């Protein structure tokens, strides 16, 4: 979603400063085009920013001994403009970043880790023909029927292929598969998604909600066999941020009846919405896109981080054309500190969704940025 484009632009502020901001020029409006698969599952290195993003919730066991978890896996690719004409194999033309996190609901703790490297030399790659991301020992890829990763010979995976992520880390590890249960969801105008007041602020964007998740989750040496639901976003863009944007609020929710809800807004320094949008897809497959002004985020409760001292509105009423929803976190402390890799502090965590009648109707992820510090634009 938009959050990843903005997050990556802000997170890479250190890199843009280093390679000279003069290389950045305003982008033209992206043309509408027909997304083609499996090719568009793969990387688009001609665009400045791109990300593949999976969030979800899972359960191990049942009854009194059941354990619940949230998880987040994100791979970023960023083109470094000033090195594109260099002949050296050591030139950092594409950078690959990855974030991963696990929310232990019963343990009331967020675990997270991060990686970064330039593409090449067998260390990091983002394949072109189909989804295939690797960063050292972390990976995310669509899988062929024989269990091998797509994007290499003898060809791509089928349209209903499962995605798989493998992420070993010091305190936790993930080995999960995600099987599509619904068709692709093209966000915005058939996959062309506006991200701000100017036409140039746009991206190509699709989602895969209601993924059936299963596999292994290891936490502090204890392995859990888990099942659950997940959401995948893939987005690529050339656009720059609106100069007045300092942060954003976003939700992506899998509803228990099979519906899928996306809603977001960009904020200026006063907290007013610069842009808002989203979508709702019913279990029947009927799609409803939200127009500018139809999504309103109203904060209900604030939590102050002991780490950053930032105050996050962790509970919201989100008004959309589909319904008025209440969003509540399963755990307040789900702040992400990525200063060791990409530089930002932001809140992203597993949350519950309630409809206007107070019924618990879904679960997904809430993300909030620009509260610890304004994004570096």
Image (spheres, grey):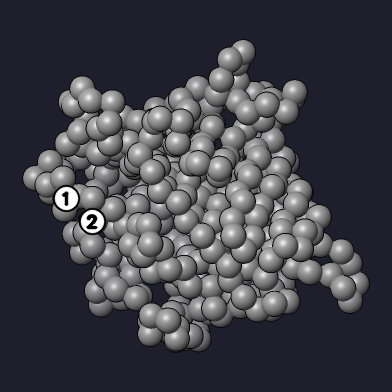
Q: Nearer the viewer, residue 341 or 320?
A: 341
How many residues crowd mark 1 within 10 Å: few (<14), some (14–19), many (20+)? few
> What quarter of the picture does the C terminus occupy?
bottom left
State the image quarter where residue 66 is shown.
bottom right
Q: Is mark 1 on a helix, strand or loop?
A: helix
Name which residue lies at 25% across and 32% down: 91
Horizontal side of 92 relative to 35 (left or right) equals left
Name the mark on residue 18. Answer: 1
Q: Residue furthest left?
A: 22
Pinpoint residue 286: horizontal percent, then vertical percent.
63, 44
Question: Is residue 346 at least partly visible in the picture?
Answer: yes
- Image height of 189 relative to 152, above or below: below
Pinpoint residue 141: horizontal percent, then vertical percent.
59, 35
Pinpoint residue 297: horizontal percent, then vertical percent.
45, 72
How many residues crowd mark 2 within 10 Å: few (<14), some (14–19), many (20+)? few
- Image height of 206 relative to 228, above or below: above
Q: Is mark 2 on a helix, strand or loop?
A: helix
What distance separates the C-alpha of mark 2 from that of mark 1? 6 Å
Horizontal side of 279 relative to 281 (left or right) equals left
Name which residue lies at 50% across and 22% down: 129
- Image height of 97 relative to 375, above or below: above
Question: Is residue 328 at least partly visible in the picture?
Answer: no
State the image quarter where residue 56 is shown.
bottom right
Are the residues flagged by discs 2 and 1 in contact, CB closer than 8 Å?
Answer: yes
Name which residue lies at 17% across and 36% down: 82
The residue carrying mark 2 is 14
Q: Which residue lies furthest to the top in this view?
A: 154
Name which residue lies at 23% across and 25% down: 88
Pinpoint residue 95: horizontal percent, then vertical percent.
34, 41
Q: Which of 77 and 87 is in front in this view?
A: 87
């Amino acid at each position: 979603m938009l959050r990843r484009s903005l997050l990556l632009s802000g997170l890479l502020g250190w890199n843009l400063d280093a390679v000279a901001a003069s290389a950045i020029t305003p982008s033209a409006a992206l043309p509408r085009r027909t997304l083609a698969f499996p090719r568009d599952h793969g990387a688009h290195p001609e665009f400045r920013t791109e990300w593949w993003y999976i969030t979800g919730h899972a359960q191990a066991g049942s009854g009194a001994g059941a354990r619940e978890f949230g998880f987040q896996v994100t791979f970023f690719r960023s083109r470094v403009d000033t090195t594109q004409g260099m002949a050296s194999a050591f030139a950092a033309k594409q950078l690959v970043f990855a974030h991963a996190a696990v929310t232990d609901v019963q343990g009331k703790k967020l675990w997270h880790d991060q990686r970064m490297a330039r593409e090449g030399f067998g260390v990091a790659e983002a394949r072109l023909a189909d989804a295939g991301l690797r960063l050292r020992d972390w990976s995310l890829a669509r899988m062929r029927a024989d269990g091998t990763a797509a994007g290499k010979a003898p060809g791509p995976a089928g349209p209903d292929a499962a995605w798989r992520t493998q992420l070993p880390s010091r305190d936790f590890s993930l080995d999960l598969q995600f099987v599509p249960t619904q068709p692709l969801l093209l966000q915005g105008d058939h996959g062309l998604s506006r991200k701000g007041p100017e036409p140039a602020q746009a991206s190509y964007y699709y989602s895969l909600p209601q993924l059936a998740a299963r596999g292994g989750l290891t936490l502090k040496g204890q392995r859990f066999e888990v099942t659950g639901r997940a959401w995948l976003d893939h987005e690529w863009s050339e656009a720059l941020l609106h100069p007045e944007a300092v942060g954003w609020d976003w939700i992506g929710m899998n509803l228990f009846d099979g519906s899928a809800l996306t809603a977001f807004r960009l904020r200026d320094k006063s907290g007013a919405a610069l842009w808002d949008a989203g979508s709702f897809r019913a279990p029947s497959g009927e799609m409803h896109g939200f127009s500018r002004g139809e999504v309103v985020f109203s904060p209900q409760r604030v939590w102050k981080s002991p780490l950053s001292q930032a105050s996050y509105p962790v509970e919201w009423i989100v008004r959309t054309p589909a319904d008025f929803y209440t969003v509540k976190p399963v755990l307040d402390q789900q702040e992400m500190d990525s200063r060791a890799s990409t530089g930002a502090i932001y809140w992203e965590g597993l949350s519950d969704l309630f409809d206007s009648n107070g019924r618990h109707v879904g679960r997904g992820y809430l993300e909030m940025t620009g509260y610890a510090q304004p994004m570096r634009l």
